[in-house]
Amino acid sequence: MTTFAIGERDFLLDGEPFRILAGALHYFRVHPEQWEDRILAAKEMGLNTIETYVAWNEHEPERGSFRTDGALDLGRFLDLIADAGMHAIVRPGPFICAEWDNGGLPGWLTRECGSNIRCSDPTFLRAVGDYLASVLPILVPRQVDRGGPVILLQVENEYGAYGSDKEYLTTLVRWMRAGAVTVPLTTVDQPEDRMLENGSVAGAHLTASFGSNGIERLGRLRKHQPDGPLMCAEFWDGWFDHWGGRHNTTDAATAARELDEILSTGASVNIYMFHGGTNFGLTNGANHKGYYEPTTTSYDYDAPLSEHGATTAKYLAFREVIGRYARLPERVRREPSASPAFSSPFDAAARLLPAVPLERGSEFSSVPSMDDLGVYRGLVLYRARATAGVLRVGEVRDRAQVFADGRPIGVLEREHNDVGIELPDGIRLLEILVEDQGRVNYGQRLGEPKGLIGLVTVNGRELRGWSATPIDLDRPDRYLDTEHDGRTGALGPVVARSTFLLDEPADLQLATRDLGKGFAWVNGWPLGRYWSRGPQHSLYVPGPATRTGENELVVLALGGVLPSRARWLAQPDRGPLEA
């Protein structure tokens, strides 16, 4: 039986010192048919371990229905890691941050618990207990002492930056051990005294997260934990992007020097990210540090392995550094080919609003939030009878397009704190299309409701008699079933289709500079959000989502005028390095 333990100064694999050389690779950000390739790329860079979070809200979007199919087959992902001869670190949360929608917490959970999350609140803990009862049976049989790859499990995530409920952390440790977890448990926090103190718990080994000044920060970690191996469990080798900002990059040589500094101390490391991947669909999170900033669809992170799986200068630099401390395997993996560059005509289009039926039983006296409707992602179309005057909304979360009798009259942006707009003379039907642009994933605003929040008034009087209809973003092509004019020249919101032929399946890059703002799908695979404000101006299409012969692109363009053709690029366009 293989053993893995924490020694006086080292991790111990079968009793011998073992340095963890890990890289973060989130299975839920990568097409499942590409998992094996990305794992191989990590091994060839010299890594011996793959680290992943577990996104609770993806596995359990509805309470009591825990999914492990397709892209959520965590067990298969871990088995592929084992097949590659590598180890695994799993971070099941329940909170993960990860620039992921709601920090990985399900919307139904935060609706029920409000602000009583990540603490010893009984309602929250009951749900967490049920979650662990679903995820641990996947992890426990795959622990290293049972012949699997898993060598470490993390308790919570950067908890010291959020709270100090030791009873909560102790409960998680107790439940994991009661659930037959035998490998060492860890916590991770930034190496600041308060965070390390608040985030620590008896029974879990302290690790740190940082991107520079490794010797100093590992020294601070050592002060809080005199014994045991040192580990940077998140070495930030890049950063993520926000819509409207710049595309973040870090110098490869500088990042390699920082990695070398960590390894020179004898410490273990987890490179965050090794391969960032993509926030497919509506999974991106957001930050709110005084103002709201949604994260882009691309989670490239300027990582050693790019979003579409290409090795970078940072990959080569890191491999050289790792080679000073570990034996490097031969490189046999093939680099991805350039994507085919072409254009394809939009051959069908339909206006969205007329295609959305008024559903019976959806009438409300006061305007409901999206969470009130049980809708935790996407779009909701609100409708009410209104007269001319000043429309005011308590708060918009996160973007509201306002229409008078089908005509667009303006947009209310959360980012700009917009709450009011003038309704024109003669208006009869008010329609407000509200987009959730991603739930906050870090800090005290976790779990806040989305949609129209508070009272909606016209000339100071509450507007009543609302309908609220969710837009079906699982089947956007259903809105093309209505009679369409085949043209895309109308102002959005418009659903449009483009069909194109491929000689064989291939990675693609959909150009988005001319598409305005919206969402895109290829053959039903949800590519994610696009926005002409950038920084990213293309969407990655994983090759396994395409097929030989006819393929179908569907876009839901929220505003602006769509061009007559979709454009496909040979290389990604991640935008400028400066805003």
Image (spheres, grey):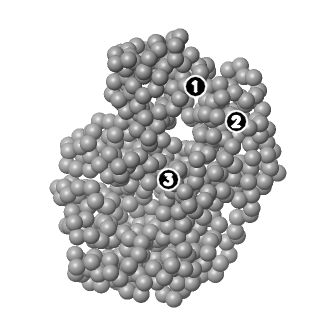
Answer with left or right where residue 352 lies relative to residue 393. right
Q: Position of residue 12 (x, y in %)?
A: 35, 81
Observer-nearest of 513 and 261: 513
Tell how many labels: 3
**Mark 2 is on which residue type?**
Leu
Q: Nearer the viewer, mark 1 or mark 2?
A: 1
The residues tagged by marks 1 and 3 sit, at their Cα atoms, a distance apart of 26 Å
Please name the residue that numbered disc 1 is placed on: 408
Residue at the image position 59 percent from the left and 44 percent from the top: 531
Is residue 2 something one can see in this rendering? Answer: no
Instruction: Identify the residue at horizontal 39%, vertical 25% (top origin).
Output: 392
Q: Residues within 10 Å of mark 2 (few under 14, many from 20)?
A: many
Task: Decide if residue 262 is in sight here.
Answer: yes
From the viewer's perspective, is residue 355 above or below residue 506?
above
Residue at point 68% right, 20% down?
482
**Mark 3 surroundings: few (<14), some (14-19) or many (≥20) residues within 10 A:** many
Neighbourhood count class around disc 1 (C-alpha, 10 Å): few under 14, some 14–19, many 20 upward: some
Q: Does dot 2 land on a helix, a strand or a loop?
A: loop
Left or right of 438, for residue 487: right
Q: Residue at x 74, y 38 (%)?
A: 563
Counting from the top left corner in percent of width and height, residue 396 is at 41, 33
Could you tell me which quadrant the N terminus lies in?
A: bottom left
Badge 1 element? strand
Identify the element where label 3 is drawn.
loop
Q: Earlier in the sequence, mark 1 or mark 3?
A: 3
Pointer 3 residue:
242
User: Dot 2 corresponds to which residue?
Assistant: 562
